[in-house]
C-alpha cells in the first residue's frame, strides 16, 4: 500500500491533466493505452469483525481506518490489426487472495468482429456472470464507492480462460443480445474463520440474454461452475487430526476433511441464476439485480440489491439497499449460514471529466455473521455496523 | 380560434427556423444513407450496435469542439457521464468509444473520405459535401 499510494496519486495528477480516453500511442491509432484506479479509505466502527469487499480478500478493514479494501489500479493496452481483428490486454493490482497487491492479468483476448452484430473473443475474459460483474473494479464507471458487497462480494471468480460469442439483433428500435461463454478458471476464497479453499474450476459455462429498450436494459443469465476444492486452514487441519486419531483404531475409516467439507458445502458444482434491470435516462439511474446460486449440497446463496441515483449538475446522490442470505440443507446445518442486509447512502462528485470523488455510508445489519467478514469474535452474534467510505476514482 | 392556431403555427415555424444552434448528424454526401433515427444514432455513437442502413460497419467520429453539446442533445448527459459510461464498456472489453478528432477540418476530411464515417456539425454550418441524416434540437 505504501508503494501503491504515491503511484496512484501520481496517476490522478496525470488523469486530471489529460483527455479521458484511450490515447493512441502510434500515429495510425492502432496501439492504445488506458487505465483506471481507485484510492479508497474505509472506516469501520465494529471491533468484532473486519469488513471485506469480497471473499477473495484474506484480511478485512478492522476498527478504524483502512486503505487496503478498495484501492486498486488497472491498465489496458489494445492493438487493432484490422477493423475485424483486435487484441486487448488488461492488468490489475488490488488487494486479493495472495494477501498483497501483486498485479495479475485480468484480460488478454483476441477479438474477431466479422459483422456489427457478431463478436467472438478468445483468451482470458472477465467473468460476465451478471450485469456489471466484469467491470466491478472500475470505480469510475458506477456511482457507488464499490458495487454492493452483499451482491458482488460472494462472486468466486474474476476471469475465465476460454471464449465467448455475442450476437446482437435489432428488434425495431430495441436491441436483443445473446452471449454464450465457456472456459476454465481458478481462484482462492475465504469461507470463514480458519477455512479457505483453492477453487480449481475445470468448467465454467453459461450465457445471458439482454434486452435493451429505450432507457431500460434487462438481463436474464444462467451459469454453471464445476470445480475441485482444496480446503485449508485450522478447520480442515483439526478435522484431519481427529480423523487420523479414529484411523489409529479403525484402519478402514476413510473420511478426509476435504471430502467431508466438500460434501457439506457442495461448492464443487454451482448453478447461478440471475436477473437484472438497469434504467438510465438523463440524470436518473436505477438498478435492480437478483441472483440465486445453488450448491450441489442443496444449499443456496440468495442476493440482490436496488439502487437509485439522480444527477444534479456535478453531484449524484444515491441510495442502495442490498441483502444476502445463505441457506444450507447439507450437514453444515444453519450454524454456518450467513445473513445480512445493507442500507447505503452516498454521493459522487465529478471533479473533472475523468476524476470522481465519492463518499458513502453503509449501515449493515448482520443477522448471522459469515463469510464476508474476517477476524470475527467467536462470541459475536451480529448486529448493526457502520462503514464509512471515501473513494477517489479516476481513468486515464 | 383559427386565428389563434395560425398565430401559434407561425410563431412555431419562426422559432424553429431561427433556432440555428441545433446539431446535425452528418455523413458523406455519396454514402447512400438518407436518414437515421435518433435510436440509430444512439446505437452507433454509444457503441450498442454499429451497423449502417447500408449494411456496413459504422465509423462514428467525435468532434472535440462540439462533443459536449452533441451528447447533451443526444442522451441528455454531460461528458463525465459519457466517460463513466465508456469506462464500463472499455474496461470490460465490450466496445470502444468513437474516434475523437480535435479540429473540425479533420472531421470534415474524414467524413468526405470515408463512406462509413459519421460525425456531427452545428446545423447552421453544414458543408455542401456532407449530408444531414438527423437533426438534434438543443
Image (cartoon, coloured by chain):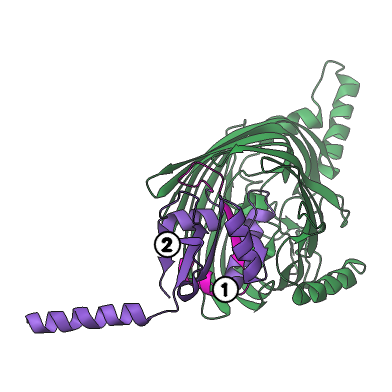
Is A98 situated above or below A352?
above
The reply to whether dot 2 and dot 1 touch (C-beta < 8 Å) is no
Q: Is residue A138 magenta?
A: no
| B58 left or right of A125 in image | left
**Image: magenta residue range:** B50-78
- Residue hosting label 1: B66
Is A344 situated above or below A289?
below
The residue at 70%/68% (across/down) is A20
Residue A379 locus on image (x, y percent):
72, 59
Crowding near pointer 1: few (<14 within 10 Å), some, many (20+)? some
The residue at 73%/69% (across/down) is A394
Whether marks 2 and 1 lie on the same chain: yes
The residue at 76%/28% (across/down) is A259
Chain A: colour as depicted: green
- Residue hosting label 2: B134
Secondary element type, mark 1: loop
Q: Is residue B68 magenta?
A: yes
Amino acid at each position: 500500500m505504501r508503494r501503491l499510494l504515491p503511484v496512484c496519486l501520481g496517476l490522478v495528477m496525470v488523469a486530471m491533466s489529460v483527455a479521458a480516453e484511450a490515447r493512441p500511442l502510434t500515429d495510425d491509432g492502432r496501439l492504445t493505452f488506458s487505465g483506471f484506479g481507485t484510492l479508497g479509505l474505509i472506516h469501520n466502527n465494529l471491533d468484532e469483525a473486519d469488513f471485506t469487499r469480497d471473499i477473495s480478500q484474506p484480511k478485512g478493514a478492522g476498527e478504524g481506518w483502512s486503505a487496503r479494501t478498495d484501492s486498486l489500479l488497472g491498465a489496458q493496452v489494445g492493438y487493432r490489426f484490422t477493423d475485424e481483428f483486435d487484441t486487448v490486454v488488461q492488468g490489475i493490482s488490488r488487494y486479493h487472495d495472495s494477501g498483497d497487491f501483486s498485479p495479475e492479468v485480468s484480460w488478454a483476448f483476441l477479438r474477431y468482429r466479422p459483422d456489427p452484430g457478431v463478436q467472438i473473443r478468445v483468451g482470458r475474459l472477465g467473468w460476465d456472470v451478471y450485469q456489471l460483474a466484469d467491470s466491478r473494479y472500475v470505480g469510475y464507471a458506477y456511482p457507488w464507492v464499490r458495487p454492493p458487497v452483499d451482491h458482488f462480494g460472494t462472486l468466486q471468480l474474476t476471469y475465465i480462460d476460454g471464449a465467448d460469442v455475442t450476437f446482437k439483433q435489432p428488434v425495431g428500435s430495441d436491441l436483443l443480445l445473446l452471449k454464450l461463454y465457456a472456459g476454465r478458471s481458478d481462484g482462492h476464497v475465504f469461507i470463514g474463520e480458519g477455512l479457505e479453499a483453492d477453487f480449481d474450476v475445470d468448467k465454467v459455462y453459461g450465457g445471458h440474454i439482454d434486452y435493451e429498450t429505450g432507457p431500460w436494459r434487462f438481463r436474464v443469465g444462467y451459469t454453471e461452475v464445476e470445480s475441485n476444492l482444496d480446503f485449508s486452514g485450522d478447520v480442515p487441519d483439526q478435522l484431519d487430526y481427529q480423523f487420523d486419531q479414529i484411523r489409529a483404531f479403525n484402519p478402514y475409516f476413510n473420511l478426509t476433511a476435504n471430502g467431508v467439507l466438500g460434501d457439506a458445502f457442495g461448492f464443487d458444482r454451482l448453478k447461478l441464476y440471475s436477473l437484472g434491470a438497469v434504467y438510465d435516462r438523463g440524470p436518473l439511474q436505477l438498478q435492480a439485480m437478483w441472483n440465486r446460486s445453488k450448491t450441489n449440497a442443496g444449499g443456496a446463496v440468495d442476493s440482490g440489491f436496488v439502487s437509485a441515483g439522480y444527477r444534479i449538475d456535478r453531484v449524484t446522490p444515491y441510495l442502495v439497499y442490498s441483502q444476502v442470505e445463505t441457506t444450507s440443507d447439507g450437514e453444515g446445518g444453519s450454524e454456518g449460514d450467513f445473513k445480512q442486509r445493507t442500507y447505503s447512502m452516498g454521493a459522487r462528485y465529478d471533479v473533472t471529466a475523468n476524476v470522481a470523488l465519492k463518499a458513502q455510508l453503509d449501515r449493515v445489519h448482520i443477522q448471522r455473521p459469515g463469510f464476508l467478514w474476517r477476524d470475527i469474535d467467536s462470541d459475536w452474534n451480529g448486529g448493526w455496523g457502520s462503514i464509512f467510505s471515501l473513494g477517489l476514482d479516476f481513468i486515464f | 380560434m383559427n386565428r389563434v392556431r395560425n398565430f401559434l403555427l407561425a410563431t412555431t415555424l419562426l422559432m424553429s427556423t431561427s433556432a440555428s444552434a441545433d446539431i446535425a448528424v452528418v455523413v458523406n454526401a455519396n454514402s447512400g444513407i438518407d436518414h437515421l433515427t435518433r435510436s440509430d444514432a444512439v446505437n452507433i455513437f454509444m457503441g450498442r450496435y454499429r451497423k449502417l442502413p447500408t449494411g456496413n460497419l459504422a465509423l462514428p467520429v467525435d468532434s472535440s469542439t462540439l462533443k459536449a453539446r452533441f451528447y447533451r442533445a443526444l442522451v441528455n448527459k454531460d461528458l463525465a457521464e459519457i466517460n463513466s459510461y465508456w469506462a464500463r464498456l472499455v474496461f470490460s472489453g465490450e466496445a470502444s468509444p468513437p474516434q475523437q478528432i480535435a479540429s473540425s477540418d479533420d472531421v470534415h476530411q474524414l467524413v468526405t473520405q470515408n463512406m462509413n464515417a459519421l460525425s456531427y456539425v452545428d446545423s447552421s454550418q453544414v458543408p455542401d459535401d456532407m449530408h444531414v441524416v438527423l437533426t438534434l434540437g438543443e
